[in-house]
Amino acid sequence: MALIQITDLTFAYPGSFDNVFEHVSFQFDTDWRLGLTGRNGRGKTTLLRLLQGQYPHQGTITAPGGFEYFPYPVPDASLTPLELLERSFPDVPEWRFRRELAPLAVTEDALYRSFSTLSGGEQAKLLLALLFAREGRYLLIDEPTNHLDETGRALVSRYLAKKSGFLLVSHDRAFLDGCVDHILSIGRSSIEVQRGNFSSWYENKQRQDAFELAQNAQLKKEIGRLKQAARQSRAWADKVENTKIGPHSAKVTGEADAMGGRAYIGEQSRRMQQRRKNLERRQNAAIEEKSALLKNIEQAAPLKLHQLPYHTNRLALLRNVSVCYGDVPVCFGVTFSVEQGDRIALRGANGTGKTSLLRLLCGIVGKQVELFKAPVFHRRRLFRKDMVRHHIQSSDKKIPVYNTIKKLTRSTHYFPCR
């Protein structure tokens, strides 16, 4: 059992006016399965990089050992996973790596394929197994579910639930519920650590937000009432004060003797002024109390996407398309069309060609040969040859396709990859 301590941490990016973190202090145990949550832009990835010592900062970060970051930067994607293990982690025996892979359901042939030819989900599982195979390192896991299908997410969640000692960043609530036992949340004005999973933390946050909203509404009414009373007291005090001196004073008009003399009028004015000051103090106290509320309540502006015009309705047509890496088919018999306004969900298990089809639609050209069977209508051209070879690689420059694909709004279709 050891602690990672962050004390009086202050950090801002160069040239930025606002601090990402300002005098932040907290600690957590290295045995915890810690989930890190927060809105985009709150500093989750920045915190991971600060823990790794990548940025200069004020304050202190104390940790008993080193950190490993997921996703691990693969030095050469042409290597197989076993070659990557030998080159990047020579201290890790192969049997330990295979032991970590066993519950992740990675096929044997994936260990002997080039890393670049593996699907995003397969790459994520392999990298997790590589990092957990090392001993004495604390894992910082940043969004591991980005390329995982539903089955893969469940597998990785169960895998992490049996581990200890990691910090996990994810926006997937169900995934967090399945594998963490503490939550570190970065809010608008504070950072807090709670025991439990995401659901228990979120329930507590909703209760706190509801209490603060109710308290805020009550204080708004109280402040309004105090403002009205202060205005009324100020008007009465000013009216009484004006009767002390001046051309319209009580002495000139002869009312002073009837009211008990100028001393009585002065005392009455003093009391009214004191009452006004008391009301203003109460009002300021209520405003100060109100300002302490709602600091961590998140409000998201509605997202609006506007479809760009294009002169044809049909954007792409695929008929009986098959994708292969070398002689290995990834998917086959895929037929669908993309029309303006469509909302299309492309679903399928990891490694079934979803990303390859998207790359085909985007016209990404590279060295890795993929095989497509025609006819294919793609980017305004109909290919009618029996076999069409297309070169695709994720790192190459993307050729712009249809700007209208940025917003597909009309109908929803599901096309399984298998």
Image (cartoon, helix red, strand yellow):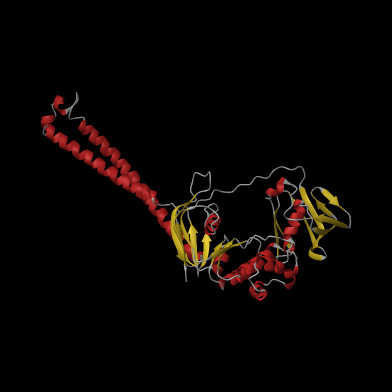
Residue 207: quarter of image: bottom left
Residue 357: quarter of image: bottom right
| Residue closest to the far top | 247
User: In front here: 256 or 329?
Assistant: 329
Percent x, y of residue 88:
66, 65
Image quadrant containing the C terminus: bottom right
Residue drawn where x is 60% and y is 71% of the image: 159
Task: Give left or right: position of 278 versus 319.
Answer: left
Residue drawn where x is 25% and y is 44% of the image: 278
User: In front here: 325 or 377?
Assistant: 325
Residue drawn where x is 16% and y is 28% of the image: 250
User: In front here: 245 or 257?
Assistant: 245
Percent x, y of residue 346:
71, 59
Task: Give left or right: position of 309 versus 267.
Answer: right
Percent x, y of residue 170:
57, 61
Residue drawn where x is 49% and y is 61% of the image: 184
Task: Give left or right: position of 262 versus 70.
Answer: left
| Residue closest to the far right | 385
Residue 380 appears in the picture as rendered: yes
Percent x, y of residue 415:
73, 60
Residue 374 appears in the picture as rendered: no
Q: How many marks?
A: 0
